[in-house]
Image (tube, helix red, strand yellow):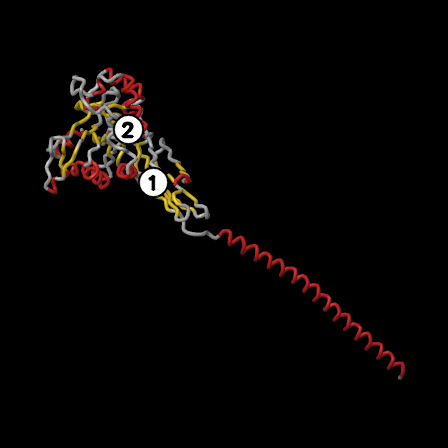
Amino acid sequence: MAKKRKIKTKNVLLMLLTVFLILFCIFMLYKIFSTLGDKNSKKDDKKVVKEQKSKKKKEKVGEAPEIKLYGIADMKMVKNGVYEEYGAAAIDKEDGDISKSIKIDNKIKKDTPGDYVVTYSVTDKDGNETKVERKVKVFEVTEKDKDGISVFMYHYFYDDTAGESGETSNYLAKSLFEEQLKYLHDNDYYIPNMKEVALYVDGKLDLPEKSAVLTLDDGEVSNYTIAYPLAVKYQIPLVWFIVTSWTDVTGDVQKEMYNSGYVRYHSHTDNMHEGGCGEQHGGKILCVDHDTGVQDLKTSAEKLGNSDALAYPCGDTNEHAQAIVTEAGITLAFTTEFGQIHVGDNKLALPRVRINDGIGLNTFISQLK
């Protein structure tokens, strides 16, 4: 009997020991996992703090800058034509004018018809970025010009719709000019720039049969008050031949017109728009000292930022004048001789089609052909 109690006591002790060992193991496991949990918790806390700091760094401060696109936002260009970049301006509320920081990404393939975009992007000091796009459609010329392109010549305008009248035949009624622009727009005429005109005359560029150029001489105020708004309305770019000693192209009005993309400035000399040579209309360039004439045209080109084209003052030319134009580096020079321009013409004596007051739409259309 005593032996049985002894065995029973031993079994109870073993059981208690086993329970103790199990509880001890559980306790140790708890401590281990608790320690790991604390470590992981601290890691997670550090991670959260780090992410919060990173997030704060990434958070943008202030508003994104604004980009104002200059030139035509949705334009067309003939295959192998010349894309002219007008640029853009960028203003930021905190940083001010950051236009110089604009990056331009131009992926136009001028020899491959298709739809392209030119992307303008700028980032301010706070990391705010803005992007805008200019759409450019490069198209294949299917109906090529074979018989010449009309370069029209205008001077001044008056608002007949407001009861005004023109002082001379050089003044064209607003209503007539509007009819002409509307016709060009509605019939999808292509208006090449002067670099494209030069390539055309050299036989290096095909222009559509429906092509025309509109030029305005002198830069009189009605060009701004009447012609310019109509050019924007009907999306027809105009070439302004200006006397650069008379007109400052850096002025607010002149910059507004240029930045629209519907006014392209070219030279009417810097200070030679006067007679006195006793030859034809007597334009000064016909007899001015060679070096003086060259310097005048170089001054004009510097003010304009290009030497693409010139309209002779008073409209006449001779070998002396053409030698001046050549040395000054001018590519094209236009006279007032009547006619269309053709492939192979003398690029320094190109004709134009004069538009005087009273010329109606039917006459204008006949002169396009």
Question: Considering depth in this image, is 222 or 336 the residue closer to the camera?
Answer: 222
Tell me what residue is drawn at x 32 percent, y 39 percent.
70
Q: Disc 2 on helix, strand or loop?
A: helix
Picture coordinates of residue 116 (x, y %)?
Answer: 36, 38
Picture coordinates of residue 114 (x, y %)?
Answer: 34, 37
Find the residue positioned furthest to the bottom.
1
Q: Is residue 50 above or below residue 110?
A: below
Observer-side mark, 2 or 1, equals 2
Q: Which mark is residue 135?
A: 1
**What residue does disc 2 label?**
194
- Displayed quadrant of residue 217: top left
Q: Disc 1 on helix, strand or loop?
A: strand
Find the residue positioned furthest to the right.
2
Q: How many marks?
A: 2
Q: Is residue 202 above or below residue 37?
A: above
* Dot 2 amino acid type: Met
Tell me what residue is drawn at x 29 percent, y 17 percent.
291
Find the residue positioned furthest to the top.
319
Q: Is residue 167 above or below residue 341?
A: below
Name the image quarter holding the N terminus: bottom right
Tell me which numbered mark, 2 or 1, is placed earlier along the sequence: 1
- Displayed quadrant of residue 294: top left
Picture coordinates of residue 364 (x, y %)?
Answer: 15, 32
Q: Which mark is residue 64?
A: none
Picture coordinates of residue 343 (x, y %)?
Answer: 25, 22
Whether residue 59 can be seen here: yes
- Disc 2 to disc 1: CB gap under 8 Å: no
- Displayed quadrant of residue 335: top left
Tell me what residue is drawn at x 14 percent, y 30 percent.
170
Name the image quarter holding the C terminus: top left
* Dot 1 amino acid type: Lys
